[in-house]
Structures are given as C-alpha cells and as structure tokens.
C-alpha cells in the first residue's frame, strides 16, 4: 500500500513549501494515517511524537472525538450557509462573541477567514480602509520585520521578512517595508531600526506595523521583555496601527490565551488561525479594536471584502468546541508548566553537549540552536547542513520537529501539543540530547 501511495504522491501531489525535485527522487518521508494525543502513526506502522503539533497548530492534540462530533452535529444541522451582507447564522455569532470575550477588552469584533494568510491580508486591507475612512488615504504602507513569516498570499508574502519567499514568482508588492527584529540584537537596536525606517519612509505613509509576538518560522525568536512595550510606544508616537500576528501564538501556545499577554501589550488588530480549531478544520480571522469598529459603523459604504468561507458554520462550531476544551482542561497553564520543563531540559542538553548555543522556550514554543562555537555563537557554514542532520537524527528516534536554516542559522523548533505531560517532555529531551551527540560525533 505504502509503495503505491508513494508512486501516486510523486505523480499527482504538489506539496506546499517543498522541493518537487526531491519529492521525485526520494518520495515523501512520511505518510501519516493516524493521530492520537501527541502521537502520529505512519503507513508503515511506526509511531512518532508530533513535537511540532504538525504545523504549530494541533493544540489540543490529535484524535479528539469531541471535535469530530461538533463537526458532525453542525454539518447535519446546517453545514454551510453564507454570512455575506445581511445573512447570518448562530455558530459564527457565538464564536465571534466567544473570541471577543477572550481577546483584550478593547478588541471586540471579529472578521473570519479560512486561514492565516487570508487573515493577514484582511488585516492589511482593514487597516488601509480605516485610514481612508479617517481621511488619511496616503497611509498605505505595511511595516514588518526581517525573519517575519506572515503567510503566502500576495500581501502576506510581501510582509514576510524571509526573502526566499519573495523570489518564487516575484510576488513582492509595493508599499511593504521591513525593519530589524531583535534576533541577536537588543531592543534598542531593533527599535532604532524601526524608527529609522519610519522616518525614511514618512510616518504619514504608514498604515500599520505587523509582528508575531514570537517569530515562528523565522526560528522561534522570543523578544526581550521590554521590546513590545517600546513597539507600542513607537506606533503610538507615529499614529501607526499595531497588528499582532497571533497565528502561532494564539490559543494558549505560549502559556497565555494570546501571546501578547506575556508582555501586557494590547495591539489594534490581532490575526489568528491554526490553534483556533487546533487544525481540525481550516479557519482564521482578524479581531479589530473598538476604534476601528466604530469607524466601520460610521461608514455608509459596503465593506468590499469577504471570503465564501468567512464565518463558515461548521468551522465555527469546531472552533467553539476547541476553545471550550482549551479552557476546561486549563491548557494555557499546562503549556506554561510543561514549557518550563522543556526549557530546563534544553538547558541540560546544552550542558551535556558541545554544539548547542542559545536555547529558549515560552510556553510550548521553543528552540535549540546549533552553533560551531557556543562561546562565541559562531554559526556553522550553511553547506554543513547541520540542522538537517539533527532533524534526521530526531526523526530516526521517533521525534517529529522542524528546522530553520535561513541566514546560516541551524535552529531546531519545538511546538508540541498543549496536552503533553512530564514524561513525554522528558522523552523528547532524552532524544534531543542523543540526536545532538550523534550530530556532534558526525561533524567533528
Ligand atoms: N502567520 C504566521 C505567524 C504563521 O506561522 C503562518 C503559518 N505558518 C501564517 C501567518 C500563514 O497562515 P496559513 O498558512 O494558514 O495561511
């Protein structure tokens, strides 16, 4: 069965973010067919720990029948109906109210999308629309940061700060600008760079600044504690809207319901996806501030922006059940506690090996950096492919995690399901240590 599937995969399936050539040469590394808790099982019957929650999104773990039941019940009652214009339905209304109740107090209205890229594109359009209504239509530019990942739709690709994503089809759009991020840089350096870009471009041309509370695909970059307070101040000084991209960090990933709560900073817009349904069904959205909502209320014109699946009833019902589980099982708290254990474990791995640089975690979002010299933080040459070796060694030990190798970095990322327990964290740590020691031996 497996061989047949590999053959069909190679013939017909274009994988997202993949090398098609490698697929033709090697076929898929895994064909998973079952998920249960933190585990995934493939067609060969091998079981792995899903230490990435697949794509940072299976927050409540795999195989939860409650979500399947919520979906079935809603599909049988009303699988789909439109939310365009004057049409509405209960699941989206209830979900919007629920999300407003867990978001910061000043953000209480929600626009729904099918995923994260659409959420960010929507946030950019809503920010520009706000400024047009406010009589400042020249505010069009979107400021983001290097190493940011905001998705692959046309605008969200442009806001992404990883140039590899721009090159593919020349998708980089005008009016998108980037500043430094606090990776191997202080808050001051990052904020000075932001200020410089704002001054160079003209503050009166900038609609919004977007940032992930913790940069995910850029390498799990956790900012210094004072960073977002300074960002908020700078945005206020220049009247720039602040969009928090909570697509990875939302829904309890970092030990709080939303990532920005870690620093007590309230954005003007928040985008979410992934963890809102724990990935069981595609969904996302933008939560907007009451000030932006007020502006929309005052306009007699139509908001010419809407996806067929904005507020999809079945997705909404699944999201409601998912949030209920996150709350009932205190998964934000478990994320915080297990995250502390994960970080301690990473620190032990650093002590017991010779190629680990910075280790970090906030809730269950963490990273281990491999470096040539931990004393000077000198990176390995890119062509040594050190992190690929580490990921392979982890896969061989039954741990699925993900690498980041942009800008000569070698970063192993971790984002396990929030239901994980102490023994399972310890199993991940043991295997990380063994894998790092194996790579160390191989390259020395
Ligand atoms: N923003 C962030 C921070 C993300 O991590 C992602 C997805 N990895 C996106 C946006 C894009 O979301 P999607 O893939 O659902 O379009």
Image (cartoon, rainbow, N blue to C red):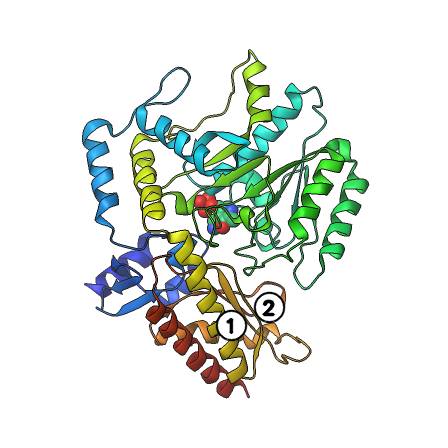
Residue in front for this viewpoint, 401 or 92: 92
In the rendered image, the vertical position of residue 3 relative to residue 238, given as above or below: below
The residues tagged by marks 1 and 2 sit, at their Cα atoms, a distance apart of 8 Å
In the rendered image, the vertical position of residue 347 relative to residue 180, given as above or below: below
In the rendered image, the vertical position of residue 411 relative to residue 179, given as above or below: below
Residue 267 visible to the viewer? yes
- Name the element at disc 1: helix
Point 30% across, 40% down: residue: 321
* Residue assigned mark 1: 387
Residue 281 visible to the viewer? no
Point 22% across, 68% down: residue: 44
* Residue assigned mark 2: 409
**In the figure, residue 235 lies in which quadrant?**
top right
Left or right: where does residue 293 sit relative to residue 96? right
Left or right: where does residue 1 sit relative to residue 156? left
The spot of residue 84 in percent (x, y) is 40, 20
The answer to whether mark 2 is within 8 Å of ligand 1 is no
């Amino acid at each position: 069965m497996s061989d047949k599937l590999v053959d069909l995969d190679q013939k017909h399936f274009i994988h997202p973010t993949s090398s098609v050539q490698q697929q033709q040469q090697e076929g898929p590394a895994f064909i998973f067919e079952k998920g249960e808790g933190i585990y995934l099982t493939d067609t060969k019957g091998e079981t792995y720990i899903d230490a990435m929650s697949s794509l940072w999104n299976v927050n409540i773990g795999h195989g939860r029948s409650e979500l399947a039941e919520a979906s079935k019940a809603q599909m049988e009652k009303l699988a789909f109906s439109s939310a365009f214009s004057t049409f509405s339905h209960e699941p989206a209304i209830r979900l919007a109210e629920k999300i407003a109740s867990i978001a910061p107090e000043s953000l209480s209205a929600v626009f729904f999308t099918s995923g994260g890229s659409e959420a960010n594109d929507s946030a950019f359009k809503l920010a520009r629309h706000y400024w047009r209504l406010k009589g400042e239509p020249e505010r069009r530019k979107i400021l983001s940061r290097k190493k940011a990942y905001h998705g692959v739709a046309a605008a969200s690709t442009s806001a992404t700060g990883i140039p590899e994503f721009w090159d593919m089809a020349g998708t980089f759009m005008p009016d998108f600008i980037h500043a430094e991020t606090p990776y191997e840089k202080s808050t001051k350096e990052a904020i000075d760079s932001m200020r410089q870009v704002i001054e160079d471009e003209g503050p009166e041309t900038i609609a919004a600044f977007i940032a992930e509370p913790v940069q995910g695909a850029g390498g799990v970059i956790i900012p210094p504690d004072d960073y977002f307070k300074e960002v908020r101040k700078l945005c206020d000084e220049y009247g720039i809207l602040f969009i928090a991209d909570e697509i990875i960090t939302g829904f309890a990933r970092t030990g709080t319901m939303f990532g920005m709560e870690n620093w007590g900073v309230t954005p003007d817009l928040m985008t979410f996806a992934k963890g809102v349904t724990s990935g069981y069904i595609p969904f996302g959205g933008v939560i907007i501030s009451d000030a932006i909502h007020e502006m929309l209320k005052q306009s007699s014109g139509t908001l010419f922006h809407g996806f067929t699946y904005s507020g999809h009833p079945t997705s909404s019902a699944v999201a409601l059940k998912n949030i209920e589980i996150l709350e009932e099982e205190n998964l934000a708290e478990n994320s915080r506690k297990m995250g502390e254990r994960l970080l301690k474990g990473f620190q032990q791995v650093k002590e017991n090996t010779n190629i680990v640089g910075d280790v970090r975690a906030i809730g269950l979002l963490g990273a281990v950096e491999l470096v040539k010299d931990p004393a000077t933080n000198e990176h390995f040459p890119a062509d040594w492919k050190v992190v690929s070796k580490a990921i392979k060694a982890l896969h061989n030990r039954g741990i699925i995690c993900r690498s980041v190798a942009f800008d000569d970095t070698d970063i192993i990322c971790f984002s396990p399901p929030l239901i994980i327990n102490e023994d399972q964290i310890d199993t991940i740590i043991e295997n990380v240590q063994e894998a790092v020691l194996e790579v160390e031996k191989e390259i020395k």
